[in-house]
Image (cartoon, rainbow, N blue to C red):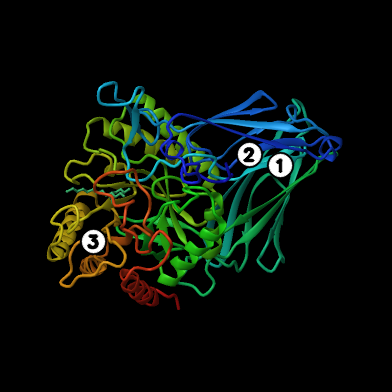
């Protein structure tokens, strides 16, 4: 099996495509003997592996991880062999249950007259294919034995001064060591040194700073400084380069502010999904997607419905694309303490990984939970409290889809996101209902929550090449008309001042499980799965570029 990739679509074997259970990966590698001579700490790092992973090195267990979308690693200094082959073995299990995030259910069909012996299926609480495999790169890296374990950066702005609040965490593979000191330098994008400090925790002021701005409102979006952290003391030597975007995020009762300026989200819900590699990291695809985002004039996306690869987050930072970082908690339908513990854990891991990305302006804790269930109230209070405890610098949100009247989760959020499908899942074919229903639901929701509100999904399945006029569902003409009706309503709502964004469902067509309302996947893409534009892309491009022109800073 290639790594990184999903295993499902690489072979001609249906059993592998639809596989549920343990899958085994194995590979061999050599390590340079110089790593031994230098007494390096050797770490084995997985960008992600879906879903439960057990890792063995040379036959010895080294680490387990649960959850398919976040990294994990093991110190393998004492497990590796030099001069001879190393064997790396990974057992992966993609089974989803009531107590995994996201949830699923294994259904056994034990009627031998109707089903082959041992037949079972994996049902899932979500609308995308449960791709599995080692989805992101696996890396061996070294550090000195006393090393920089973590860096936390929070930025503020005071007039033209950028304020970088940083904390360096130092760790050691040896039980006792002399605590080193830190030397911290800040370089701008021309590699000029603009500030320096001597402590492992401090505040650095960057005068006349260039701030991190989203694309579309500033001529130089995505400005990044580099924090060079050096450990000093005895023969200790470790260096880490951490990029920093100086920006602030704030929420009032009706606006979303980046660097004190109102920000209007225009973009997409996306997926990590493509032909053959499934959810596996694919660098050309990442670059293509960012080029399409820029071509269409969008400024943001939501990592629906799980944290995306670090390569994607780095691109978002560099290109000034704003990200709503979503946890894998999609479609939760029960809220017990076992699930809660796992949900808190995944929030911890996600914030641990993504806290320093300036592009990440908001944490989305869930998508479409059954938030009218009585247990949802305490559950989401706990999830939001936990998230804010880990990161008080970003607002928290969730994509809600149930009736706002009975929703119990929204009151804990700083921003309300809602998914609505007027003229699609309700009143299909009748685009004339969209304007009124959209205005009505958002106006009333705002009255209930009194918080900034945005649409996090709206969309219509569209089979590329199908045309009909007057528009008919599934045609490109219907998707175009559907969008235009929504845009009229969004403009009305924008004028009211509390409506802060529009994210269309979806960026591109994507694969789902086989079911009778999905014709080889979900076709709500503005682009096809091959990343070619449907007719509606032109409408969207026209709108986004026009709106971006209106919000350009002087
Ligand atoms: C989640 C997303 O992953 N939201 C779904 C998307 C879809 O296309 C899916 O791909 O189905 C839409 C949920 C719609 C909820 C509203 C139902 C209203 C019934 C009348």
Crowding around mark 2 (Cα neighbors within 10 Å: few <14, some 14 to 19, many 20+) is some
Label 2 to label 3, Cα distance in Å? 44 Å
Label 3 near label 2: C-beta < 8 Å? no
- Residue 454 position, x and y percent, is 29, 57
Q: Work out whether residue 378 can be spotted.
A: yes
Crowding around mark 3 (Cα neighbors within 10 Å: few <14, some 14 to 19, many 20+) is many
Upstream in sequence: badge 2 or badge 3: 2
Crowding around mark 1 (Cα neighbors within 10 Å: few <14, some 14 to 19, many 20+) is few
Q: SS class of the residue under badge 1?
A: strand
Residue 142 vs 97, above or below: the answer is: below
Label 1 near label 3: C-beta < 8 Å? no
Q: Nearer the viewer, residue 122 or 317?
A: 122
What residue does disc 3 label? Answer: 474
> Which quadrant of the view contains residue 322?
bottom left
Residue 363 vs 349, above or below: the answer is: below
Point out the image quarter for the C terminus: bottom left
Q: Is mark 2 within 8 Å of ligand 1?
A: no
Label 3 to label 1, Cα distance in Å? 49 Å
What residue does disc 2 label? Answer: 45
Q: SS class of the residue under badge 3?
A: loop
């Amino acid at each position: 099996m290639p790594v990184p990739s999903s295993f499902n679509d690489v072979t001609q074997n249906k059993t592998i495509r639809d596989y549920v259970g343990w899958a085994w990966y194995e590979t061999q590698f050599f390590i340079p003997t110089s790593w031994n001579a230098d007494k390096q700490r050797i770490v084995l790092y997985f960008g992600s592996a879906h879903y439960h992973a057990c890792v063995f090195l040379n036959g010895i267990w080294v680490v387990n991880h649960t959850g398919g979308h976040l990294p994990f690693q093991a110190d393998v200094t004492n497990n590796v062999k030099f001069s001879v082959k190393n064997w790396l073995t990974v057992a992966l299990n993609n089974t989803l249950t009531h107590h995994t995030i996201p949830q699923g259910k294994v259904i056994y069909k034990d009627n031998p007259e109707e089903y082959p012996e041992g037949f079972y299926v994996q049902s899932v609480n979500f609308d995308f294919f449960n791709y599995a495999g080692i989805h992101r790169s696996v890396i061996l890296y070294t550090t000195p034995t006393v090393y920089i374990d973590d860096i936390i950066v929070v930025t503020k702005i005071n007039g033209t001064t950028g304020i970088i609040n940083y904390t360096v965490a130092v760790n050691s593979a040896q039980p006792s060591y002399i605590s080193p000191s830190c030397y911290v330098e800040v370089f701008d994008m021309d590699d000029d040194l603009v500030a320096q400090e001597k402590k492992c925790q401090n505040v650095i002021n960057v005068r006349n700073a260039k701030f991190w701005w989203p694309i579309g409102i500033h001529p130089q979006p995505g400005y990044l400084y580099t924090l060079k952290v050096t450990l000093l003391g005895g023969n200790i030597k470790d260096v880490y380069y951490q990029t920093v975007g100086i920006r602030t995020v704030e929420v009032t009762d009706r606006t979303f502010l980046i660097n004190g300026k109102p920000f209007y989200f225009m973009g997409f819900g996306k997926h990590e999904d493509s032909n053959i590699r499934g959810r596996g990291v694919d660098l050309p695809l990442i670059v293509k997607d960012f080029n399409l985002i820029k071509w269409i004039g969008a400024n943001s996306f939501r990592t629906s419905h799980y944290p995306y690869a670090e390569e994607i987050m780095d691109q978002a930072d560099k290109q000034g694309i704003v990200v709503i970082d979503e946890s894998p908690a999609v479609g939760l339908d029960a809220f017990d303490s076992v699930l809660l513990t796992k949900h808190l854990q995944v929030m911890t891991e996600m914030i641990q990984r993504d806290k320093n990305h300036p592009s990440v302006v908001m944490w989305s804790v869930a998508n479409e939970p059954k938030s009218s269930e009585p247990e949802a109230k305490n559950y989401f209070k706990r999830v939001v409290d936990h998230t804010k405890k880990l990161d008080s610098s970003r607002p928290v949100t969730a994509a809600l889809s149930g009736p706002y009247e009975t929703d119990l989760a929204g009151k804990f959020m700083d921003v309300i996101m809602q998914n609505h499908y007027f003229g699609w899942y309700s009143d299909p074919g009748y685009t004339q209902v969209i304007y009124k229903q959209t205005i009505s639901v958002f106006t009333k929701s705002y009255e209930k929550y009194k918080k900034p509100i945005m649409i996090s999904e709206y969309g219509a399945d569209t089979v590329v090449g199908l045309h009909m006029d007057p528009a008919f569902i599934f045609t490109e003409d219907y998707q175009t008309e559907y969008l235009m009706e929504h845009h009229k309503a969004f403009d009305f709502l924008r004028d009211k001042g509390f409506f802060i964004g529009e994210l269309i469902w979806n960026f591109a067509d994507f694969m789902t499980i086989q079911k009778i309302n999905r014709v080889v996947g979900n076709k709500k893409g503005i682009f096809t799965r091959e990343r070619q534009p449907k007719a509606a892309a032109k409408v969207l491009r026209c709108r986004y570029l026009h709106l971006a022109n209106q919000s350009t800073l002087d």
